[in-house]
Image (tube, coloured by chain):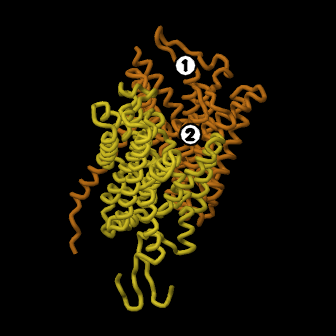
Chain colours: A yellow, B orange
């Protein structure tokens, strides 16, 4: 904490210290999940963790680096595909999932030299075309059998109970690590520059911000996160169908969760993921009306509440539970 | 001969893509918005024509007389309700809001009309499969040629409208600089509304033609958006005739790809699109470096 006369700059407020402790305790409780909750609950939480990862990754791209991608399913599907390939070549299933995700994230590095040259809508649809191309190429692989798909059969070596617990722990660990990475990144120097780029790319560049390096870091991190989510999804569903795993609906979910929860806030996507999970759980059986509703909600939030629910809370109460910025505090004022 | 046939078909298919893409290109040119609901609006137009033609036992061409003005109003309302507000909120918001709109349109179409794949081909008699034989193994479909001709007429008409009429001039002025256009007495809101109306009406026409020459279902939209965008980018953003050229390149690439593999149709188009995009990036990076090398550092 730096003291400047009667003013001070601080990062952690009392509220954020309390919430930091609460979040840590929650993570510890979750760590014992498979011992505490029933099978159904464990499955549901695993799905929720995957959604949180997806929302946080999309938010990192759009909310912090200003990159609206409608092609993140590229990495989601590619991670699962690599895992299937590795397992077919004899690697054990869980290492296959992890290495598959890493390879898919690594693929984003060369891709970034191409994609990050594109701007705005060009980047959006460009990413989508990349996802389509990968989908079509994966379809050509004999192992996948076109749209019929295949499955990660070697996972059957585990009993359903132990598989459920492993998937849960893997998803929880991945979520905590990835959220931690984003949190650390946003608080770093590069994180501050990424936010400067989002607000005004040319102004940031003229101040000496290394625009491309910052964007590239986020792009690769988001790709890795989506790939991790994709392999986790494969672990829970076991089947791999190109049409599902490379489906645009993943991006639709990500956009909905982020916009409703709060674009450009750290806490928002987590809240958005919880809300989306509840909506899907409760309204999934009223058919596709709920999907139409998601579209309308995304549109309404984009236009009327661009910083989502959490953005509104932050603005109203000045509350930051997990602080990524700094705040100036004048002595004598609260 | 197969190749000549495929290339001719590719060129004619390019006419459809140009027709589909000109609304996207036009809206981007005037408002700087890439409308991610573009393809779904095309499918909406197809469903409206289908519904009107069925309900009143009309030819789809006659149904268009009713549907196109409706689509124009949809475009105007879209502009007033969604695009204007999104534009004010920044560069990213139009992408987000139109993506949300796309998801909503697809799923509402699904709820109203169900999952069936449909086509207008049975409603246009023999036009759907009539063709002129050039030689024994070379023939040109009448519908494909009609669509190509429509594309040329539409692009030409739009070009003339923008270049020669007072309204067209107002649109170009707003596209150049909306605030300055306001200063000289142009109502930019009205111009945006008009531009969106024109764009969405052409999209409705394109959707109807899609439904005549092929099949459609509630989730056909996204692929049409990708095709339209590819045609626009290949031809160079902002140029109407470039869009026709882009559509033709896309159509030829797809038809040639289809000769190699059943999946080659889509793959061929995507790869040509990415190659052209990559080439353009490489050229601009190279020329940028050359300019940087040539210009000496300023001395004070």
Q: Which mark is residue B45?
A: none
The secondary structure type at the circle numbered 2 is helix
Q: CA distance from mark 2 to mark 1?
A: 25 Å
Q: Is residue B129 above or below residue B273?
A: above
Looking at the picture, tell me which residue is in the foreground, A155 or B261. A155
Task: Confirm whether residue A67 shows in the render.
Answer: no
The secondary structure type at the circle numbered 1 is strand
Task: Confirm whether residue B7 shows in the render.
Answer: yes
**B134 horizontally vs B297: left or right:** right
| Residue receiving disc 1 | B141
Q: Earlier in the sequence, mark 2 or mark 1?
A: 2
**B87 horizontally vs B299: left or right:** right
Looking at the picture, tell me which residue is in the foreground, A197 or B292. A197
Q: Position of residue B30 (x, y in %)?
A: 54, 52
Asked whether the beta carbons under mark 2 and mark 1 sit within 8 Å of each other, the answer is no
Disc 2 packing (10 Å; few <14; some 14–19; many ≥20): many
| Residue receiving disc 2 | B39
Q: Quadrant of residue B23?
A: top right
Looking at the picture, tell me which residue is in the foreground, A24 or B12. A24
């Amino acid at each position: 904490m730096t003291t400047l006369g009667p003013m001070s700059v601080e990062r952690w407020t009392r509220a954020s210290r309390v919430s930091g402790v609460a979040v840590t305790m929650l993570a510890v409780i979750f760590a014992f999940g498979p011992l505490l909750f029933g099978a159904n609950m464990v499955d549901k939480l695993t799905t929720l963790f995957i959604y949180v990862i997806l929302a946080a990754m999309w938010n990192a791209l759009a909310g912090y680096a200003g990159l609206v991608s409608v092609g993140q399913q590229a990495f989601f599907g590619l991670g699962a595909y690599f895992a299937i390939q590795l397992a077919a070549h004899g690697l054990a299933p869980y290492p296959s999932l992890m290495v598959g995700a890493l390879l898919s994230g690594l693929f984003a590095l060369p891709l970034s030299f191409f994609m990050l040259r594109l701007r705005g809508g060009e980047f959006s649809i460009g990413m989508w075309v990349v996802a389509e191309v990968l989908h079509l190429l994966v379809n050509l692989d004999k192992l996948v059998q076109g749209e019929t798909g295949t499955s990660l059969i070697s996972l059957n070596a585990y009993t359903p109970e132990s598989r459920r617990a492993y998937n849960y722990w893997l998803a929880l660990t991945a979520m905590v690590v990835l959220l931690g990475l984003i949190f650390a990144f946003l608080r770093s120097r590069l994180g501050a520059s990424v936010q400067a780029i989002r607000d005004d790319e040319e102004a940031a560049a003229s101040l000496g911000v290394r625009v491309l390096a910052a964007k590239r870091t986020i792009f690769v991190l988001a790709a890795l996160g989506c790939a991790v989510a994709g392999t986790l999804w494969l672990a829970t569903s076991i089947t791999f169908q190109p049409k599902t795993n490379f489906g645009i609906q993943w991006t639709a979910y990500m956009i909905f969760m982020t916009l409703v929860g709060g674009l450009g806030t750290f806490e928002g996507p987590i809240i958005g993921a919880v809300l989306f999970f509840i909506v899907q759980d409760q309204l999934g059986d009223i058919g596709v009306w709920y999907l139409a509703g998601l579209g309308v909600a995304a549109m309404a939030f984009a236009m009327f509440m661009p910083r989502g629910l959490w953005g509104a809370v932050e603005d109203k109460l000045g509350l930051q539970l997990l602080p990524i910025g700094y705040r100036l505090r004048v002595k004598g004022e609260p | 001969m197969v190749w000549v046939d495929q290339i001719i078909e590719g060129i004619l298919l390019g006419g459809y893509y140009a027709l589909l893409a000109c609304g996207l290109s036009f809206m981007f040119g005037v408002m700087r918005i890439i409308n991610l609901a573009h393809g779904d609006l095309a499918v909406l137009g197809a469903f409206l024509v289908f519904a009107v033609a069925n309900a009143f036992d009309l030819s789809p061409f006659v149904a268009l007389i009713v549907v196109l003005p409706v689509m124009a109003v949809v475009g105007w309302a879209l502009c007033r309700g969604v695009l204007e507000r999104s534009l004010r909120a920044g560069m990213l918001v139009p992408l987000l809001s139109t993506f949300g709109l796309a998801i909503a349109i697809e799923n509402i179409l699904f709820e109203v009309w169900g999952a069936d794949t449909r086509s207008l081909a049975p409603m246009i008699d023999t036009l759907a499969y009539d063709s002129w034989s050039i030689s024994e193994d070379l023939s040109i479909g009448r519908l494909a040629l009609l669509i190509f001709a429509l594309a040329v007429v539409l692009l030409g008409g739009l070009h003339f409208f923008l270049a020669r009429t007072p309204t067209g001039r107002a649109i170009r002025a707003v596209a150049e600089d909306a605030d300055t256009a306001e200063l000289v007495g142009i109502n930019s809101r009205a111009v945006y509304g008009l531009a969106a109306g024109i764009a969405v009406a052409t999209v409705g026409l394109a959707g109807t033609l899609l439904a005549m020459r092929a099949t459609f279902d509630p989730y056909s939209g996204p692929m049409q958006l990708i095709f339209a965008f590819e045609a626009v980018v290949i031809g160079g953003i902002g140029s109407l005739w470039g869009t026709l050229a882009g559509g033709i390149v896309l159509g030829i690439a797809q038809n040639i790809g289809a000769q190699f593999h059943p999946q080659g149709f889509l793959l061929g188009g995507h790869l040509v699109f990415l190659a052209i995009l990559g080439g353009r990036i490489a050229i601009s990076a190279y020329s940028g470096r050359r300019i940087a090398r040539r210009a000496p550092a300023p001395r004070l």
